[in-house]
Image (spheres, rainbow, N blue to C red):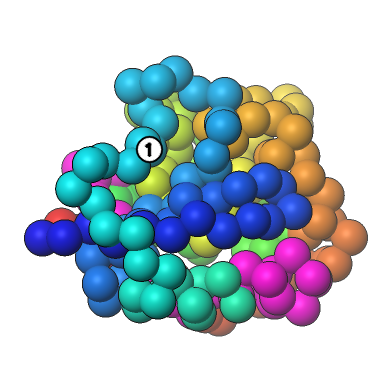
Amino acid sequence: MTTYYAQIDSPVGALLLTSDGAVLTGMYFLNAPVEESRRSLVAPDWVLDPAVAPFAETTAQLAAYFAGERQDFDLPLRAEGTGFQQRVWEELCRIPYGTTISYGELARRLGDANACRAVGLANGRNPIAIIVPCHRVIGANGKLTGYGGGMDRKKALLDLEARVGGGSPGVGEPQLALL
């Protein structure tokens, strides 16, 4: 399967989009402060093609999100991960715009209050930043904790959502599919 990519600018820095030609498979912060082994780097066999689906629609929806005009994304997504990671990412999509929850609450929603660490690890492996809103998960004490895109980006995303206001849960939720 061919992996297509495009790079776009955003108010929180450059983003790398990946697609299989039909669905969005990844969105990564370029120059993010994560260890090299976890950064999405363009592989030699990837094809640069900004016209591939759904890059134009992703770019348009992100522009509306950053302008405060969009609270939900409606894009075809496919995130590759373990069954547990898939469950965590699906639950992330249920966190309403403009709200945050703790890792413990996310674990409880998944049925295992003791799985905080595993939830945190799965959250950190989310391959579709912003759209699968891992930035909405914070520490139990209400403080911002780890974010693969960097704490400044996490704070910027949460500040944007707080300024714009609350969302409507369940409307336009991205749907993830197992690979």
The mark tally for this picture is 1
Is residue 79 located in the magenta-colored stretch of the structure? yes
Q: Is residue 84 visible?
A: no
Which quadrant holds residue 44? top left
Tell which residue pokes out farthest to the left in this image. Answer: 1
Residue 87 position in % (x across, y down): 31, 51
| Magenta highlight: main SS | loop
Which residue corresponds to the image point at 89% horizontal and 60% vertical from the top-left?
163
Which residue corresponds to the image point at 81% horizontal and 56% vertical from the top-left?
160
Closer to the camera, 77 or 173? 77
Residue 34 position in % (x across, y down): 50, 23
* Secondary structure category for the residue under label 1: loop
Is residue 108 located in the magenta-colored stretch of the structure? no
Q: Quadrant of the N terminus?
A: bottom left
- The amino acid beneath tag 1 is Ser
Residue with the mark numbered 1: 40
Q: Which residues are magenta?
A: 61-85
